[in-house]
Amino acid sequence: MRIALLGGTGDIGAGLALRWAYDTDHELVVGSRDPEKARAKAEEYETELDSRGVDRKITGFANEMAADRADVVVLAVPPYHVADVVADVADKLDEDALVVSPAVGIGSDEDGMHYNPPSAGSVTELVADAAPDHARVVGAFHNLAADRLANLDVDLDLDTLVVGDDADARNLAADLAEDIDGLRALDAGPAANAAEVESLTPLLINLARYNDGLHDVGVTFE
Amino acid sequence: MRIALLGGTGDIGAGLALRWAYDTDHELVVGSRDPEKARAKAEEYETELDSRGVDRKITGFANEMAADRADVVVLAVPPYHVADVVADVADKLDEDALVVSPAVGIGSDEDGMHYNPPSAGSVTELVADAAPDHARVVGAFHNLAADRLANLDVDLDLDTLVVGDDADARNLAADLAEDIDGLRALDAGPAANAAEVESLTPLLINLARYNDGLHDVGVTFE
Ligand SMILES: C[C@@H](OP(=O)(O)OC[C@@H](O)[C@@H](O)[C@@H](O)Cn1c2nc(=O)[nH]c(=O)c-2cc2ccc(O)cc21)C(=O)N[C@@H](CCC(=O)N[C@@H](CCC(=O)O)C(=O)O)C(=O)O
Ligand SMILES: C[C@@H](OP(=O)(O)OC[C@@H](O)[C@@H](O)[C@@H](O)Cn1c2nc(=O)[nH]c(=O)c-2cc2ccc(O)cc21)C(=O)N[C@@H](CCC(=O)N[C@@H](CCC(=O)O)C(=O)O)C(=O)O
Ligand SMILES: NC(=O)c1ccc[n+]([C@@H]2O[C@H](COP(=O)([O-])OP(=O)(O)OC[C@H]3O[C@@H](n4cnc5c(N)ncnc54)[C@H](OP(=O)(O)O)[C@@H]3O)[C@@H](O)[C@H]2O)c1
Ligand SMILES: NC(=O)c1ccc[n+]([C@@H]2O[C@H](COP(=O)([O-])OP(=O)(O)OC[C@H]3O[C@@H](n4cnc5c(N)ncnc54)[C@H](OP(=O)(O)O)[C@@H]3O)[C@@H](O)[C@H]2O)c1
C-alpha cells in the first residue's frame, strides 16, 4: 500500500513512518505544508533506517501531492487543523481512500490533561464530516506515544484501537496497525464510540505524570 | 480495616467482598437498603468462601448501620443514586473516613456505551460534593468487571485507577486495592481527572462487544 503521512514531519508522523518502514513493505510518503521540510524529514528517516541496515526509499512532498494517489492518508497534524488539512487534500483522495485520524483534542489545567472534543463529538467524527463521501474515515493510533514508536530499539507489545463507521475500513486500518511488530489492533466500533477511544489519551498522559516509572504510557486490554 | 460495602448486595459489591474476604484480613460489612437482604447476601458470600476452605465472618446491615464506624465506605450503587446514599449515611461517617466511588454514568445507543457524566463533571466529583467535608472521597475500581472479580478461580493481573483530591486518601485506596492479589493500583491524580478515568469503562464494554474473545475486559498500562 501507498501510505501518505500528512504532517509526517512531526512526532507521531515520525513514529509511524519509522515503524512502517522498518517492519513492512508499504510505500511511505511524508507530507508537509512545506515540501522542502517533507523531503528533509524523509531523508532523516531514511538515514535512521540505514543506520539499522534497512535500505528504504521514503519520499517527501507537499500534503496535496502526498495525498494524491495514496491508498491510505494519515492526518498526523494537530487536532485543531485536521479539518483544514482534509479540505486541502479532498479532491486528491481516491474513491475508497482510507483516511486515518490519530488526533485527540486535549486541554489541560494544573491537575492534568482533559479530553476536549470538538462539537462533532470527537475528532474522528469531525474528520468524517469534513472528508468527501467517497473516502472512508477511521480513528486509530491515538493511544501510542510518538517517542515510543520512533525508538526502534523498544518492543511495543501494546494495543491500539480502531473506530469508524465502515467496518471494512476498520479492518483495513487494523491490518495496517498489526503490520507493525508488537501492535495488536482492537475494534471499538462505529464513529459514535470515538469519544471513548480518544479520551483514553489524556488519561495515559495523566498516569505518566502521577506514577513514577511510567513514561510514554500505552495500554493493553484483556 | 473495617470496610462497608453499601449496596454490597449487587454485582460489584459481591466481587469486592469476595476478593477482600479471600485475600485479606479486613473486616467486611455488607450494606443494603434492606437489612434482611444484606444478611442473606453476606451469608451467601460466607458460603462461597467456605466452599474454598476459607472460614470468614461477613456481616450484613442497613446501609446506615454498615457505614457506622467503618474506616472505608464503598458506594457500590448505581451512579444515579450515589448522592442519595451518601446523604443517607453522612452523619455516620467518621472523621477521615475513606469514601470510595466505583460508579460510572453510562448511556448507550445502538452503537455502544457512552460516558454520561453528571453535571459535576464526574461521579467522583458528584460524591465529593455530596459527602461531608471531613470525609475523604476517591474514585476507584471503575474498570474492573464485577463477574471477573466475583469468580475467585480467575487470576486478575489487572490495573485499577485511583483518583481524588486527597493524595493520602488515594494512597490508602491504592493500598486496599493492592491487597487484592493480582491488582495493581495506579494514581490518576486529583478529582478533576476523574472524567478521563470513568470514561474508560464504556470503552471496555464496547471492546467486549466488538472483539471476539474479549469478555469482562480489563486493562493494564505500561
Ligand atoms: C518536555 C516533555 O516532553 P514533550 O516532548 O513535551 O512530550 C510530552 C508529551 O507531549 C509526549 O509525551 C506525548 O507523547 C504525549 N502524548 C500525546 N501528546 C499530544 O500532544 N497529543 C497526543 O495525541 C498524545 C498521545 C499520546 C499517547 C500516549 C502517550 O503515552 C502519550 C501521548 C518531557 O519532559 N519529555 C521527557 C523528557 C525528555 C526531554 O526532552 N528531556 C529534556 C529535559 C529534561 C526535563 O525537562 O526533565 C532533556 O533531556 O534535555 C519526559 O517526559 O521525561
Ligand atoms: C446479559 C449480559 O450480561 P449482564 O449481566 O447484563 O452484564 C453485562 C455488563 O453489565 C457486565 O458485563 C458489566 O460487568 C459491564 N461493566 C459495567 N457495567 C455497568 O453497568 N457499570 C459499570 O460500571 C461497569 C464496569 C465494567 C468494567 C469493566 C468491564 O469489563 C465491564 C463493566 C450477558 O450477556 N452476560 C454474559 C453471559 C452470561 C449469562 O448470563 N448468560 C446467560 C444467557 C446466555 C446469553 O444471553 O448469551 C446464561 O448463561 O444463561 C455475556 O456477556 O456473555
Ligand atoms: N505526540 C504523540 O505522542 C501523539 C500520539 C498519538 C496521537 N497524536 C496525535 O497526532 C497528531 C499530531 O501530533 P504530533 O505530536 O505529531 O504533533 P506535532 O509534531 O506538533 O505536529 C505534526 C505536524 O503538524 C503540522 N502542522 C502544524 N500546524 C499545522 C497547521 N496549522 N496546518 C497544517 N499542518 C500543521 C506540522 O507539519 P508541517 O509544518 O510539516 O506542515 C507538524 O510537523 C495530533 O493530532 C495528536 O493528537 C500524537
Ligand atoms: N457491574 C460491574 O461490572 C461494575 C464494575 C465497576 C463498577 N461498577 C459500578 O458499581 C456500581 C454498582 O454496580 P452494580 O453492577 O453492582 O449494580 P447493581 O448490582 O445493579 O446494584 C448494586 C446495588 O445498588 C443498590 N441500589 C439499587 N437501587 C438503589 C437505590 N435507588 N438507592 C440505593 N441503592 C440502590 C441495590 O442494593 P439494595 O437493593 O441491597 O439496597 C443493588 O444491589 C455502579 O455505579 C457501577 O457503575 C460496576
Image (cartoon, coloured by chain):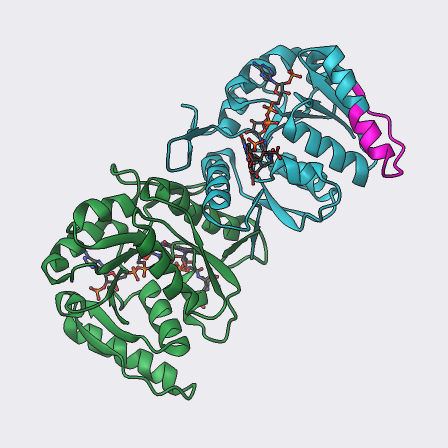
Chain colours: A cyan, B green
Residue at 70% of width from left, 36% of height from top? A150
Report if residue B42 is visible in the image.
Answer: yes
Query: Does residue B86 sit above or below A140 in this rendering?
Result: below
Image-based side of B150 in relation to B120, left or right: right
Image-based side of B43 in relation to A128, left or right: left
Q: In which quarter of the image is ligand 3?
A: top right
Q: Residue B41, position in %: x, y?
A: 26, 75
Instruction: Please tell me whether residue B64 belongs to the stretch shown in magenta.
Output: no
What segment is highlighted magenta in the picture? A44-59
Query: Does residue B136 sit above or below A167 in this rendering?
Result: below
Q: Specify the quadrant that holds the N terminus of chain A.
A: top right
Image-based side of A188 in relation to B199, left or right: right
Q: Which of A147 and B5 is in front in this view?
A: A147
Q: Specify the quadrant that holds the C terminus of chain A.
A: bottom right
Q: Quadrant of residue A75?
A: top right
Q: Residue A25, position in %: x, y?
A: 83, 35
In the rendered image, the residue lying farthest to the left is: B91
Instruction: Please tell me whether residue A56 belongs to the stretch shown in magenta.
Output: yes
Q: Residue A70, position in %: x, y?
A: 75, 22
Image-based side of A174 in relation to B29, left or right: right
Total marks in image: 0
Residue at 58% of width from left, 46% of height from top? A218
Residue at 39% of width from left, 86% of height from top? B54
Q: Residue B163, position in %: x, y?
A: 36, 49
Query: Does residue B63 sit above or below A46 in this rendering?
Result: below
